[in-house]
Amino acid sequence: MVDVKNIRKSICQMAKHLYDKNIADSSGGNISVRDGNLIYITQRRSGEVYQWLIEEDSILVTDICGNPVIGSVENITREATTHYYIYQNFSDIKAIIHCHPLYMMVFGAAHMEIPAVSECTRDHLGDQPITCTPEVEPGSENQAIEVVKEFKKRRAIDPEAGLIVNIPYHGVFIAGRDLNSTFIAIEAAENAAKIIIYRKLMFHDDPRADFSIHQKLSRGYLEKLEEQKQYCKIGQEYSDAFGKKRIYDGKCPYISKKF
Ligand SMILES: [Zn+2]
């Protein structure tokens, strides 16, 4: 959990999280957050020069067209074109991470989709596989256009879908409604890629291995599970917090007690 009250601090903490978890590498990547009309974005070469141990003062603040409010325009990353283009096209997007996660990049290098195999991937990104853009020049306007094109395709299929795309031989762009959920989603996507690679390595010729997905979990189902707070059956006998025998009636027996 990053410090959501201090945007610059939260971006620095997130950068370290991503690097420590091998989701980001030193060769590139950038993080941005939108707050009202302002965009907070990591400066160029944050991975290469600082290995993501960045200071709050290094985070640039700009408007949605990249005009600097705090910091120098020379320090804006070349990938900013794609960040700004995503914000301009999706008003609900408040955070973007671009990084080079190894396992997802294996799929990108093969121009292959990553199916949503884990419950976490399906919860945060939806049932759709993670697709690839065509090969594009890093940081180019063309990259921005192709990334947004894939994001729009995802939303056309499922208006609630998480926005993520793999760029062959480069890395991943992911966009979300806040920085924490965007991090959870990229971690889930990288784990999905790992699961698929490892199961293939371990079981590829084993006829007992079943690679299909049998259980479709809807987002509604997962939300319903979260709402459910009843863990015992009505009429079930149990020992309460003080060791007294009770019959469970669906109500908490301690509400009126002071602790
Ligand atoms: Zn990159």
Image (cartoon, rainbow, N blue to C red):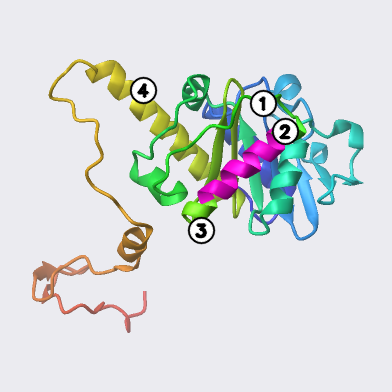
- Tell me if residue 22 can be seen: yes
Q: From what the image shows, is residue 252 above or below residue 91?
A: below
* Rendered image quadrant of residue 25: top right
The reply to whether dot 4 and dot 3 touch (C-beta < 8 Å) is: no
Q: Which residue is mark 4?
A: 197
Dot 4 beta carbon under 8 Å from ligand 1: no
Task: Measure the C-alpha gap from mark 4 to mark 2.
Answer: 30 Å
Residue at the spot of label 3: 159
Q: Is residue 97 left or right of residue 217?
A: right
Give the residue at x 47% y 55%: 158
Question: Circle 2 sits on which residue?
Answer: 142
- CA separation, marks 2 and 3? 24 Å
Per the rendered image, the range of residues in magenta is 143-154
- Residue placed under numbered mark 1 in the picture: 136
Q: Is residue 1 visible?
A: no
- Tell me, yes or no, whether the two marked residues, 1 and 3, touch with CB atoms within 8 Å: no
Q: Which one is earlier in the sequence, the residue at label 4 or at label 3?
A: 3
Dot placed on the residue nearer the N-terminal end, 4 or 1: 1
Look at the numbered disc 1 and say if its residue's Cβ is closer than 8 Å to ligand 1: no
In front: label 4 or label 2: 2
SS for callout 1: loop
Work out how far the residue at label 1 is from the one at label 3, CA to CA, in angstroms: 26 Å
User: Given the image, on which type of amino acid does mark 3 rest?
Assistant: Pro
Prevalent SS, magenta region: helix
Q: Amino acid at mark 2?
A: Asn
Label 4 vs label 3, nearer the camera: 3
Marks 1 and 2 in Cβ contact (< 8 Å): yes
User: In the image, residue 156 lies at what x, y percent?
Assistant: 52, 54
Q: Based on the displayed image, in which of its 4 quarters is residue 52 positioned?
A: top right
Task: Residue 167 in the image: state x and y as whole percent.
Answer: 59, 29
